[in-house]
Amino acid sequence: MLSAIVVDDEPGNREYLKVLLREHAGDVEVVGEAGNIAEAKAFLEHRPVDLLFLDVEMPGGSGFDLLRGMGSWPFEVIFTTAFSRYAIQAIRFSALDYLLKPVQPEELRSALDRCIAQRAQALPREELQKQFMANIAKDEEKDLKLSLTSGDRNYFVSPKAVSLCQADGNYTELHLDDGRRFISARTLKEYEDMLEPWGFLRVHRASLVNRAAVAGITDGQVVLKDGRRVEVSRRRWEEVRRIFKP
């Protein structure tokens, strides 16, 4: 059983999330709630929890401000937010989870399952948290770094270093231009949305390529600078040919 606190300045949002948790998450017990970061900080000083549902935008300080003031934190965090692309990008790049309001039951369950899996990995927590703080401090999306894991180590890489992303069921395999490979629990569709500002292009339902890593095209395939060939779907071939034609 995971103990949790819900932090949101809107009482209706807190109650709605608690109802969803009662109905769809029997493995989570809400042990407290707070309407601002001061209340949340006071609660956390006296009651350890496993999980924090944290609103991003609140009067008197954001959810980011709460975590920044703590330096490091011994619990998992799932952010809840109305759509803010930059905030969501910083969260996703840092391998953290978020839920868009109004929260949907299936999305809540998926986020909880990822949270439980992350806790089971027991990866070094503080360096991931520091990278998250570094990401939210950036002024521009292009300066964000991806948090990736391999074995028991964390790596922080620029999206520019990724040449290819390939779907593996609900996971994604990321290929770096230095030959390293990482498996992520995020879907290829999520990476397509995350990496669009860096010029990544979906060439197949199972493949996303970095345009900067492409050497050319031939016979229905994209040829990467490292020699790898990636199949292009018939539906996307004309677009790919138009983009990469000599």
Image (cartoon, rainbow, N blue to C red):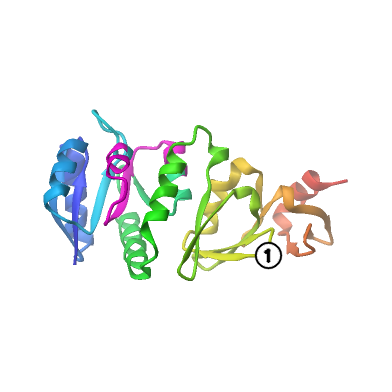
200, above or below 154, in the image: above
State which quarter of the image contains the N terminus: bottom left
Q: Is residue 70 above or below residue 153?
A: above
Q: Nearer the viewer, residue 92 or 12?
A: 92
Kindly give the residue lying farthest to the top in the view shown.
60
**Along the line of sight, which residue is nearer the eye, 240 or 84?**
84
Q: Position of residue 149 (x, y in %)?
A: 49, 63
Which quadrant of the structure image shows residue 4? bottom left
Choose between 232 and 234: the one closer to the eye: 232
Q: Is residue 104 visible?
A: no
Q: Is residue 186 left or right of residue 106?
A: right
Q: Which residues are magenta?
A: 65-89
| In magenta segment, residue 88 | yes
Crowd rating for badge 1 (residues with CA inside 10 Å; few <14, some 14–19, many 20+): few
Picture residue at 30% right of the left edge, 47% below the top: 103
Q: Residue furthest right?
A: 246
Q: Position of residue 217 (x, y in %)?
A: 82, 55
Residue found at x 21% / y 41%: 13
- Residue 174's spot in the image, x, y percent? 59, 61
SS for dot 1: loop
Instruction: Please indicate, yes or no, whether residue 203 appears anywhere in the rendered image.
Output: yes
Where residue 236 appears, as percent x and y from the top left, is 71, 53
- Magenta-colored stretch includes residue 68: yes
Question: Quick one: 14 or 152, which is closer to the camera?
Answer: 152
Q: Is residue 45 left or right of residue 208?
A: left
| Amino acid type for the residue under numbered disc 1 | Gly
Picture mark count: 1
Q: Is residue 241 left or right of residue 69?
A: right
**What residue is pinned by disc 1?**
179
